[in-house]
Image: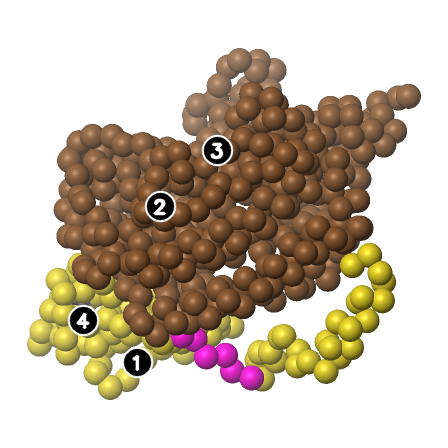
């Protein structure tokens, strides 16, 4: 690398290479299969033992009892550190990590996910 | 010539971390250098005492974003020792593999930062592009690019399967080739050699007496490496050399880190080959019996030390952390003595500092009587007085708050 000419080859090569970066918001990025993203809750599996609440390092998850033996789960997306300890602690596999990572919202009030019904997740508008 | 004292910080011009230096200059020469920490004290040790062991694993992991695995491993090792758990062999191997992947990403990151500090931004772009390879592997193995969350008390949380092994091996081949190029560059590129040689000199004796750790010590010819001296995880079964160098300057530190990268690739390949099958964790009790333990870990920046004291409950009684930067910080003043001001950024960057990780305790001194410490009540009274003297009175607000409660 003492000769300046030595660089020329690299310069020419780089000229024909694809860029190393991706056009992120326009081109979606796929996360690996077992990525620890947003947590989802399956109400029909939950038995309300609250182990998830006990082990959560940031106090992000809240399980409340609804009438007729159903449980509602509320996760604060701001407090959650996406460690998936709740997924490991749950004895009934009622919690699951997803690949979803684009969780930014414009209003702080919307930084939570509420799961109370098997079919849909309601987020407050 | 007249001496001038200039403050640098609390925002470091190059490293995005809050710390403050006071540099006494005579012209362009540095006469004295002192560092002041305490700008990012997060109270993590105290917070650990308020949480259960399992919650603490995630908390200590967040001491540092770059050596997160170092802190969580050091912590769980200490807890496992107190609880008398024997961690399965496979878990130890997985911990080692993640640890070496972390070292690779940290050293590549450092190389880029060092390039940036000396105005060699092409190196920054190159190394950070290559670093993505190892970041992707870490995300695939653990589920996240930083704060891997792989450790749990009694083992690890995720296994490594065959397809992941082949992905790691592929990545190691790419990175090894790239690192060979960087080593060639470091040995031949005259601008790099000239800029880094004889900058930030720390003699062998000074490194010993100041207690330097990690690549800073090894570049001064001290073969000090916890992985060899006091093996943990699976390091006693792996073959590797402790890379040392006797340039004693920033150039030497660059060569040591590059050499360590090559060793890491070798170790990961060996660990993947020899990793036994079996369980990856044992069940840990929630309540840890009373006892204390001290755990050492060779983080990318040097030796990281954790001390845990248990009192039989599900929360630790005391957690003490000493991050490697604290051990290395004293050497910077020595390295900068009678040197040019222009060398300051690269010399500080060369110990690969992590100031926020180093902030452990602050003691508050009364401004006029420096030997008297301020307790919480004194501090409160002091602040009320301070504001009152400037015409701001909080009494009304306080009353309002206490009424609401
Ligand atoms: S992922 Fe971690 S922080 Fe988030 S709710 Fe689960 S345990 Fe709590
Ligand atoms: S640990 Fe699982 S079963 Fe228990 S309350 Fe939480 S989600 Fe429900």
Mark 2 belongs to which subunit? B
Q: Are marks 4 and 3 in contact (CB under 8 Å)?
A: no
Residue behind mark 3: B224
Q: In the figure, A27 relative to B98: above or below?
A: below
Between disc 1 and disc 3, the foreground one is 3
Label 1: chain letter: A
Q: Is residue B206 left or right of residue B211?
A: right
Q: Give the Cα distance between marks 4 and 1.
A: 18 Å
Which residue is at the front of the view, B128 or B267?
A: B267
Chain A drawn colour: yellow
Please tell me whether mark 1 sits on a helix, a strand or a loop.
strand
Q: Which residue is mark 2?
A: B235
Task: Indicate the chain on which mark 4 is placed.
Answer: A
User: What is the quadrant of residue B307 in the picture?
Assistant: top left
Q: CA separation, marks 2 and 3?
A: 15 Å
Q: Which residue is mark 1?
A: A121
Assess whether mark 3 and mark 2 are in contact (beta carbons under 8 angstroms): no
Chain B on-screen colour: brown
């Amino acid at each position: 690398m003492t000769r300046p000419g030595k660089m020329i080859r690299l310069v020419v090569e780089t000229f024909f290479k694809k860029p190393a970066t991706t056009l992120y918001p326009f081109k979606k990025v796929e996360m690996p299969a077992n990525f620890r993203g947003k947590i989802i809750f399956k109400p029909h599996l939950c038995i309300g033992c609250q182990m998830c609440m006990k082990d959560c390092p940031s106090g992000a998850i809240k399980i409340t009892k609804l009438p007729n033996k159903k449980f509602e789960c509320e996760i604060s997306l701001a407090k959650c550190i996406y460690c998936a300890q709740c997924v490991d602690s749950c004895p009934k596999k009622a919690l699951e990590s997803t690949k979803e990572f684009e969780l930014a919202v414009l209003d702080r009030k919307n930084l939570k996910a509420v799961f109370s019904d098997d079919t849909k997740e309601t987020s407050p508008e | 010539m007249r001496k001038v004292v200039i403050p640098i910080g609390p925002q470091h011009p190059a490293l995005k971390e809050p710390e403050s230096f006071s540099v006494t200059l005579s012209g362009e020469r540095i006469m004295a250098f002192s560092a002041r920490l305490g700008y990012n004290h997060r109270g993590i040790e105290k917070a650990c005492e308020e949480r259960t062991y399992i919650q603490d694993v995630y908390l200590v992991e967040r001491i540092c974003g770059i050596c997160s695995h170092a802190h969580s491993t050091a912590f769980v090792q200490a807890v496992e020792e107190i609880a008398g758990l024997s961690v399965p062999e496979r878990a130890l191997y997985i911990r080692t593999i993640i640890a070496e992947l972390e070292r690779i990403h940290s050293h590549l990151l450092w190389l880029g930062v060092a390039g940036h500090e000396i105005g060699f931004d092409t190196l920054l772009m190159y190394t950070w592009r290559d670093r993505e390879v190892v970041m992707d592997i870490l995300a695939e193995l653990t589920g996240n690019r930083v704060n891997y969350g792989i450790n749990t008390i009694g083992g690890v949380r995720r296994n490594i399967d065959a397809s992941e092994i082949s992905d790691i091996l592929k990545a190691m081949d790419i990175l090894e080739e790239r690192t060979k190029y960087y080593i060639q560059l470091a040995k031949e590129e005259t601008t790099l050699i000239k800029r880094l040689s004889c900058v930030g000199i720390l003699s062998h004796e000074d490194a010993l007496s100041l207690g330097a750790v990690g690549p800073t010590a090894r570049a001064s010819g001290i073969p000090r490496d916890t992985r060899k001296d006091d093996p943990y995880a699976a390091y006693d079964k792996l073959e590797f050399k402790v890379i040392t160098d006797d340039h004693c300057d920033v150039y030497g530190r660059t060569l040591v880190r590059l050499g360590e990268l090559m060793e890491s690739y070798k170790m990961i390949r060996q660990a993947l080959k020899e990793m036994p099958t079996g369980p990856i964790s044992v069940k840990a009790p929630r309540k840890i019996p009373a006892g204390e333990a001290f755990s050492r870990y060779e983080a990318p920046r040097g030796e990281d030390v954790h001390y845990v004291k248990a009192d039989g409950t599900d929360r630790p009684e005391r957690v003490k952390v000493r991050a490697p930067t604290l051990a290395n910080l004293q050497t910077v003043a020595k390295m900068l003595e009678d040197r040019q001001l222009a060398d300051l950024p690269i010399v500080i960057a060369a110990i690969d500092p992590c100031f926020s990780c180093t902030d452990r305790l602050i003691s508050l001194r009364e401004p006029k009587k420096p030997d008297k410490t301020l307790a919480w009540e004194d501090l409160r009274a002091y602040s009320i007085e301070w504001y009152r003297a400037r015409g701001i009175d909080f009494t009304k607000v306080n009353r309002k708050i206490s009424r609401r409660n």
